[in-house]
Amino acid sequence: MRSGFARYAGMAAALLVSLSSGAGAQPALFPQQDLSFGTLTPGTPRVVTTSDVANRAEVELVGSGSITLEVVVPAALVSVGGQTLPVVFGPSDGMLRHKKGGQSVTFQPGTQFSFTMPPGIGGGFIWVGGTAQPSSVQAPGVYTGTLTVRILSPGT
């Protein structure tokens, strides 16, 4: 997926999806949308929730069975000039929502997350939000980072 961009202390986190290898039928991940914090104001945190359809990261998960995922998150976003901007991912900044039935489970990005995806519901969506924390003297620019979603334990 391409990185988003914004002006003056704005940033977006690019979403990179990778799969681990394993035997048998593999669940599959399909990136849908990057996490974007948009244009920021120095000294003012910007929160993106999992319900923020326009700005949350979204990955489609196809498959079923017992699955363990890991969403690897950056500690900071980085500008082309090397300046950093801290980002934080809390316990409700990740959500897995089933395509059918509407069941959802929250998780903390940056940790492993195990669940069972029932067969016949078509998989689900993984949504990730977070909080950008620009300092009061944050340098202007475009800041980017990478979220990596990995399947550590494939389904059935």
Image (cartoon, grey):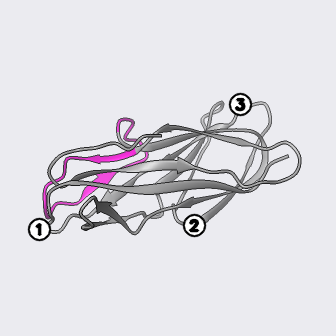
Magenta: main secondary structure: loop
Q: Give the range drawn in magenta.
A: 35-54
Nearer to us in this view, 96 or 138: 138
Q: Regarding mark 1 in the picture, which secondary structure is present there?
A: loop
Q: Do the residues labelled 3 and 2 touch (CB within 8 Å)?
A: no
Q: Residue 136 carries which label?
A: 1
Q: Position of residue 68 (x, y in %)?
A: 71, 57
Quarter assignment of residue 70: bottom right
Task: Tell me the crowding category of disc 2: few under 14, some 14 to 19, or many 20 or more residues within 10 angstroms, Cα based.
Answer: few
Pointer 3 residue: 122
The residue drawn where x is 33% and y is 59% is 131
Question: Mark 1 or mark 3, which is nearer the start of the sequence?
Answer: 3
SS class of the residue under badge 2? loop
Residue 20 placed where, x, y %?
72, 55
Foreground: 55 or 81? Answer: 81
In the image shown, does 60 or 85 lie closer to the viewer? Answer: 85
